Image (cartoon, rainbow, N blue to C red):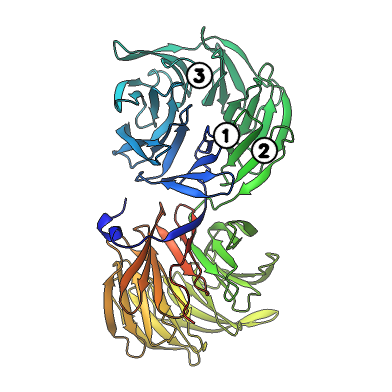
């Protein structure tokens, strides 16, 4: 997790909200039986979110991304499994829901936990390993020990993909996957689990999800072929398969049985339906824009929540069956964050394919600007708030209008190996950009066009960060070649260079502009003199991993850092000490910013999360 000595003595930052959801985890979104909380994964954390007011709590304990979640029928326990690197074992954690703590941690599966299911009376937990593991293990929850295990599928069959427990019997569960569907019986005295193969006749299917009817009569299996098999649990015989005509495109990802006996079905193409469990005839249907990965029923089924692979969550009521979008998030690593200067109400984030604008008080997406198949590496708001400038990996600089998302200007071939850093001058007349090959370029904006004023080439590698002095006459660029260069923007020449044995990731001017602070792969925060480039002091910025992001407050009294150690740190500039630590990120922190009125701190991470913290030091007047 994190080095405890670093975080113990220091006060913790107060987390205000989190934007993000690992939507690709099948059935990752759940509603707790108390009907009050949504439970879902984000990177290696499990988040509990109160439905009423959106208040969030975190369960931290996994060392890598969460791959599956299950909630016990009584609601006493939550279980979550994770992935790990090949050759290492993957943990299953059983959490005590009431205390929000780890109840048990069990380690047997190789590389990935594929699925988890609790027995109806919270006696056992069954876990299924991923394809490198291929075993099913039954755990006794009270003793926290494994009862027994077995290979999940016969040698002749393919990988097993999912497990589900019976609704009435603690000794019976079902597993399914590629060409395999088995009903297992636990023989406790002999510590064995014995499978019975279900007979599906000529049907050869890859089963992605299973639901068992409430009376335990039938097993419903959703397949990659886009149909649903209904199998008798007692006899193991196929009773029917449908829908006969129009199959669900891109397969059935998730199924839920309602109290009425009808089924809720989510497909890989985003189709979400209510269908009859007798002939699979569609009763109600909604098209969502990306694959449905989770369906969570609240209470008796009057309301349900649906998660998609695009990290969206929708709320549905049974009667209306209309999608109400309740949250969105980035599906891939967030590369950069920028807060609109002066207002501190808007902030923007960028990742693969899109730039998103958010309102700082409500974690609500205001605008999404999409450029298909491209990655936005960096973004900035112009000081007047009239445009967003952005750096893209296809070598283009794109300028957008923040109200409408309209593309106002494109600068083609701005840099050869992609544009990697960007900043706008205070007078809003120029853009300074940095590229993958180390060039720094100055562009003049002359509506309706632009002009390249100068190319400055001294860096030998990627330019990672650009900051401009308040009078627009100088700027500093940080690069992974181990140098930060201060440039004269009037004569377009380098004034000073600071060199360290590190790959610089980030640089900031102190507001009084006689000092710089830098961060990078050597884990140090260094202070430099702007005029002669000499090192003034060096602090240990983190005990593990690079510093990727840094920002300084308007009054220059505090600065913030974030990096691969996943900790947000607030520093006193003069003392050089950490005043507060924020522990919540489960991926490497990629960027971090403080808003200009010292109220809020926003940090983003490689797992697609955006976190908003209360900044602990009010602005000094």
Q: How many labels were placed on the picture?
A: 3
Q: Is residue 396 above or below residue 77?
A: below
Q: Earlier in the sequence, mark 2 or mark 3?
A: 3
Q: Where is mark 3, residue-wise? A: 167
Q: Earlier in the sequence, mark 1 or mark 3?
A: 3
- Identify the image quadrant of residue 516: bottom left
333, 470: nearer the viewer: 470
- x, y percent for residue 229: 59, 18
Residue 316 image position (x, y, % from top left): 67, 38
Which disc, if any, is residue 296?
1
Disc 1 from disc 3: Cα separation: 17 Å
**583 or 135, nearer to the observer:** 583
Mark 1 neighbour class, 10 Å CA radius: few under 14, some 14 to 19, many 20 or more: many
Q: Is residue 619 left or right of residue 130?
A: right
Q: Is residue 27 visible?
A: yes
Residue at mark 2: 316
Separation (CA) of disc 2 from disc 1? 10 Å
Decide: marks 2, 1 in contact (CB < 8 A)? no
Above or below, comparing residue 405 to residue 458 in the picture: above
């Amino acid at each position: 997790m994190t080095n405890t000595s670093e975080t113990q003595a220091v006060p913790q930052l107060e987390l205000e909200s989190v934007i993000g959801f690992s939507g690709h985890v099948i059935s990752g979104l759940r509603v707790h039986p108390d009907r009050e909380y949504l439970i879902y994964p984000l990177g290696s954390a499990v988040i509990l979110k109160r439905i009423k007011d959106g208040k969030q709590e975190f369960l931290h304990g996994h060392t890598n991304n969460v791959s599956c979640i299950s909630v016990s029928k009584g609601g006493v326990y939550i279980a979550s499994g994770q992935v790990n690197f090949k050759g290492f074992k993957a943990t299953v954690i059983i959490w005590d829901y009431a205390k929000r703590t780890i109840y048990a941690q069990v380690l047997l599966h190789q590389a990935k936990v594929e699925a988890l299911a609790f027995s109806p009376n919270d006696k056992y937990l069954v876990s299924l390993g991923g394809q490198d593991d291929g075993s099913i293990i039954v755990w006794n929850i009270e003793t926290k020990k494994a009862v027994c295990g077995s290979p999940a599928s016969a040698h002749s069959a393919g990988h097993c993909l999912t497990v589900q427990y019976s609704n009435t019997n603690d000794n019976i569960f079902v597993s399914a996957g590629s060409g395999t569907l088995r009903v297992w019986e636990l023989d406790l005295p002999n510590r064995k689990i014995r499978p019975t193969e279900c007979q599906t006749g000529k049907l050869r299917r890859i089963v992605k999800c299973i639901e068992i009817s409430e009376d335990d009569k039938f097993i419903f299996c959703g397949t990659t072929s886009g149909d649903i098999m209904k199998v008798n649990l007692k006899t193991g015989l196929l009773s029917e398969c449908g829908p006969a005509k129009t199959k669900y495109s891109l397969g059935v990802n998730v199924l839920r049985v309602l109290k009425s006996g009808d089924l809720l079905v989510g497909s890989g193409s985003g189709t979400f339906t209510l269908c009859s469990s007798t002939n699979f005839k569609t009763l109600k249907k909604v098209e969502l824009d990306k694959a449905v990965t989770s369906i969570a029923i609240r209470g008796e089924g009057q309301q349900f929540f649906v998660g998609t692979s695009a990290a969206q969550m929708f709320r549905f009521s049974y009667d209306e069956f209309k999608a109400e979008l309740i949250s969105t998030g980035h599906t891939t690593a967030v590369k950069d964050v920028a807060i609109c200067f002066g207002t501190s109400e808007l902030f923007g984030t960028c990742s693969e394919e899109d730039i998103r604008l958010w309102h700082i008080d409500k974690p609500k997406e205001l605008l999404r600007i999409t450029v298909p198949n491209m990655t936005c590496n960096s973004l900035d708001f112009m000081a007047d708030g009239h445009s967003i400038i952005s750096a893209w990996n296809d070598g283009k600089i794109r300028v957008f209008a923040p109200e409408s998302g309209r593309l106002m200007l494109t600068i083609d071939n701005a840099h050869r190996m992609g544009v990697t850093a960007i900043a706008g001058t205070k007078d809003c007349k120029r853009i300074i950009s940095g590229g993958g090959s180390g060039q720094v370029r100055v562009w003049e904006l002359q509506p309706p066009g632009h002009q390249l004023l100068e190319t400055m080439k001294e860096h030998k590698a990627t330019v990672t960060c650009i900051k401009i002095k308040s009078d627009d006459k100088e700027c500093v660029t940080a690069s992974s070649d181990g140098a930060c260069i201060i440039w004269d923007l009037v004569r377009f020449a380098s004034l000073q260079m600071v060199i360290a044995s590190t790959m610089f990731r980030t640089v900031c001017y102190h507001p009084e502009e006689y000092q710089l602070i830098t961060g990078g792969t050597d884990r140090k925060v260094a202070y430099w003199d702007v005029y002669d480039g000499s090192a003034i002091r060096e602090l240990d910025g983190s005990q593990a991993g690079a510093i990727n992001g840094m920002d300084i407050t308007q009054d220059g009294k505090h600065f913030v850092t974030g990096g691969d150690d996943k900790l947000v740190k607030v520093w006193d500039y003069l003392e050089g000490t950490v005043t507060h630590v924020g522990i919540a990120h489960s991926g490497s922190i990629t960027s971090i910013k403080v808003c200009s009125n010292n109220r809020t701190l926003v940090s983003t991470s490689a797992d697609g999360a955006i976190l908003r913290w209360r900044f602990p030091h009010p602005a000094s007047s």
